[in-house]
Amino acid sequence: MRILKILLLVCTFLNGNAQRSSLEAIDSMLLKLPGAPYDTNKVRLLYRISKAYQDQDIEKSTQFAKQSMAAAKALGWKKGMAANDILSGELLLGANKYDSAILHFKAAYATNTEINNINGILSALQSIGNVYYGQNNPNQALPYYLNALEMAEKHKNNDQICRINQNIAAVYLDQENSAKMLQYSQRSYAAAIKSGIPENTITSLESIGLAYLLGKDSTLAGDYFTRALALNERTDDVYRKANLYHYLALAKKSVSERIRYLLQAKELFDTYNPEHAMALSNLKHMGTAYRDSSMKITDPARKRKLLLQAEAYYEKVIAESKAMGHIDTYNDAESGLATVRAAKGEYRSAYELLYNYVQTYDSLYSQETKNKIATLENAREIDAREKQLQINKLALSNARRTRGALIAGSALLFIIGGLLFYQNQTRRKTNTTLLTLNNELDEANKIKTKFFGILSHDLRSPIANLINYLHLQKENPGLLDEQKKQYYQKNLATSAENLLDTMETMLLWSKSQMERFAPEKKIIPVDQLFEYLQKQIPAGSQVSLSFQNTGQLFVSTDEDYLKTIMYNLTANAFKALRSTPDGQIRWEARQNGNQVLLTITDNGPGIRQEQINALYNENAVVGTKHGLGLHLIRDLAKAIQCNISFHPAANGGACFTIAVRPS
C-alpha cells in the first residue's frame, strides 16, 4: 500500500524531536542568550533555541545548532557534542541530505557509546535507521531499530520502547504486512501507557490505525484515528492534527467525507508547512478524491469542474514533490494525472504520463525490493550475542516487474476506453433530454406571453375608467349632476369589485402553478357554495339563476379553489346569455358513486370547439375580452384534483360538470 509508505516514518521520526516552542518562548530564550555564562548551560540554551526553530525556520535552526556545537567543542563537553550531532543530522535529513545526515548520526553513536549515554545511543541508533528507511532501504534500517529496542527493553525505558516499536511498525508498513505492523504498534501503545507521555499515546494510536488501514479494516482504523485526534486536542499540535485528519480521510469510504477531511488537513498543513512531505501527500489524495468524485457525475459541466480541480492538485504535487525529491509521491501523482487527462479526452498527454509512471516505478522497485522480515526476527532470537541480524533479500526480475507494469497499463487503457464509451452514451442521453426540455420551455414561454397579454387587457379597462372619472371630477366637477355621479360611482365600485375578484382568482391560479403547493382541503356543504354564487349575481341582471341540491350533499376539497372555478363558470354563462332573451342558468348537485357531480347548464348559444380545447390541452390558451379563460379553470381544477368535462346542453346551450370527491 504505497499511499501509506511515507506517512508513519515522518510521524515516528518527528516523535524524537522536542515539541515546537511558541514564538514567545523563543523570544524569551533569545533575551537570556547575551547574559548567559559560557558553560554547558549556554550550550543547552543554544540547543533549545535551535530545536524551537526547527519546524519554523530551518536556516535559523541550523545557525544556532552550529553555535551550540562550537560551544560544546570549546568546552570539551562530549554529551553536548553528541546531542548537537543528532540535531544537525535531523536538519540534514529533513532536507533529504542523507549521506551528510548519517555521518552526524554515526558520530553521535560513537560519542554516546564512549561516554555510555544510553538515551543518546538509543536516539542515534533510531536516527541511523531513519536515514536508511528514508532511502527506501528498510533492510539496513531494521537491524538498527531492533538493536535499539533490545537496549531500551533492557533499561526499561518505556519512552524509547514506544518510539522504536513505531519505527519497526513503519518497516512492516513498507512490507505491507498488516499483522506484524499491528503487533508492533500495539507494543508501542502498551509502552506509551506506561510512559505516561500523551504524545506517545497519540502516535501509538495513529500507528494502530494505520495498521488496520493497511489491513483494509477502515472502520477500526477510523476509530483509532478519532481517539488520537481527541487526545491531540489537549496538546494543540498542528502538525499531528493535520496528519490525523489526513488518515481519517483515507479511512472513509464516502468520497464526499474523504474530501471534507482532506480539506481540513490541507488548511492545517498550509499553516504548518505547505511544502512538507505529508502536505504534498495530502494534496495528491485530494486530486484522487476529486477524480473519483467526477466518475459518479453525469452532468458534463460538473464533471469537468471536478476533473479540473483534480488536475490542479496533481500538477501542484508533481511540481513540488519533484523539486523536493519525493519520488514516490511524484510517481503516484503522475499515475493519477494520467487518468484525469484520459477522462478529459487528452489521450496523448495521458499516455506520456503513464509511460513516465511505468519507467519511474520500474527504476524504483526493479533492483532490490522486499526482504523477509521474519528471517531477521529469527536471527535476532538465535544470535543475541553478536546482535547482527541477517536479511534474506527477495529479488524480482526486471522482466517480471516490466510485465506487471504492462499489465497494469493495459488494464488502465481498458478502463479509460470504458469510461470514454460510458461518457459518450451519457452525453447523447443528456443532449436529447436538454433538446426536449428546451422545446418545452420555448412553448411554455409563448403560452405565458399570450396569457399575460390577455390578462393585462382585462386589468387595464376598470383601472382606466376609474382614472378617467377621477380626472373628470378634478377638472370639471360641475359637469355631472348628482344622479349621474351616483350612477358612475356605482358602476366604478362594481368594476373595482370585479377587478379584485379577478386578482384574487389570479393569485389562486399562480399558487396552483407552484411546485409543492398543497391546497387546504376541508368538508364543505354544497348549499354553502350555492349561497356564495347567489350573492355574485350582477345587479339588474335579466338572467334567471337556480340551484338544486336535493340530497344536501357535502364535498371534501379546497373551498377557495372550488368557489373560484364555480364563479368563473357562472360568470362565463352570464356573459354568454347577454343577448339571449329569457336566459336561464341552473346549478345542480347529485351523487354519482364515490363522487359528487356539480353541473351548470345554460340555454345560451353554446361555445366553439377551439374554446373547449383549453379544458383538455395544456398548450392551448383561450381568453375572452373580460375573462381569464377556460385555461384558468383547467389549472385550478388540476390543483385540487377535480375533473371538469363539457358537453352541449339539450337546448343548444353549454353544460359543464365538476366531479368532486364527497366528504
Image: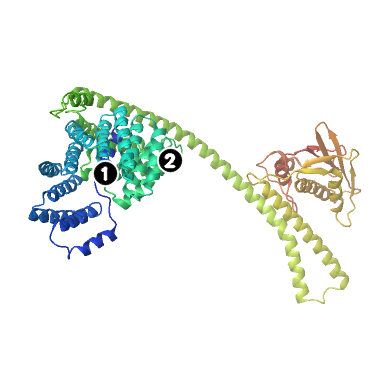
- Above or below, comparing residue 313 to residue 50 in the picture: above
Amino acid carrying label 1: it is Asn
Quadrant of the image occupied by residue 481? bottom right
- Above or below, comparing residue 373 to residue 542 in the picture: above
Return the x and y of residue 429 as percentages of the image width and height: 48, 34
Return the x and y of residue 190 as percentages of the image width and height: 32, 36
State which quarter of the image contains the C terminus: top right
User: What's the colour scheme?
Assistant: rainbow
Amino acid carrying label 2: it is Glu
Circle nearer the N terminus (2, 1): 1
Return the x and y of residue 157 as percentages of the image width and height: 24, 39
Return the x and y of residue 432 as percentages of the image width and height: 50, 35
Q: CA distance from mark 2 to mark 1?
A: 29 Å
Q: Secondary structure at mark 2?
A: helix
Quadrant of the image occupied by residue 317? top left
Residue ID for mark 2: 257
Question: For the point 24% across and 42% down, which residue is it?
Answer: 13
How many numbered circles are shown? 2
Q: Is residue 211 left or right of residue 646?
A: left
